[in-house]
Image (cartoon, rainbow, N blue to C red):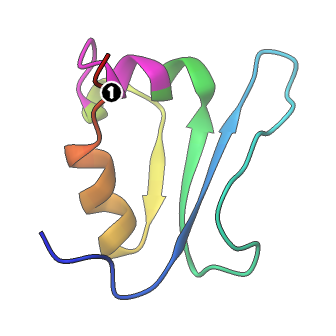
Amino acid sequence: MPPPAEPFRVEPAGPDGGIRAWGPERAAQRVRGDALDFRLLVTRRRRLAETGLTAVGEDARTWLEVARVFL
């Protein structure tokens, strides 16, 4: 896959509501939602439709669909 055309920001929220974010603050494309949903998605325990995660922008949405954790 080619790299994204523009950067995006990922903002998972912890149980206390705190957000651990990475990516440029002013990025137009974003991934937001619960950190647990994010972990379940990237470890392939849940499908995107089964989470409360949201993506703004085509690259951010594509990234959510292919993101995986390898241990």
Q: Identify which residue is drawn at 76% across, 40% down.
A: 20
Residue found at the far front of this picture: 71
Q: Vertical placement of 32 versus 9: above or below? A: above
Could you tell me residue 22's position as x and y percent? 67, 55
Q: Is residue 66 magenta?
A: no
**Span shown in magenta:** 39-47
**Foreground: 49 or 18?**
18
Q: Identify which residue is drawn at 27% across, 11% down.
A: 45
As drawn, is 12 to the left or to the right of 5?
A: right
Q: Is residue 46 magenta?
A: yes
Q: Vertical placement of 19 versus 41: above or below? A: below
Could you tell me residue 71's position as x and y percent? 32, 16
As drawn, is 8 to the left or to the right of 45?
A: right
Could you tell me residue 13's position as x and y percent? 72, 32
Q: Quarter of the image holding residue 35?
A: top right
Q: Identify which residue is drawn at 50% across, 78% down.
A: 7
Residue under circle 1? Answer: 69
As drawn, is 43 to the left or to the right of 38?
A: left
Q: Quarter of the image holding residue 51?
A: top left
**Foreground: 12 or 1?**
1
Q: Vertical placement of 41 versus 15: above or below? A: below
Classify mark 1: helix, strand or loop: loop
Q: Identify which residue is drawn at 47% across, 39% down.
A: 53
Could you tell me residue 15's position as x and y percent? 77, 15
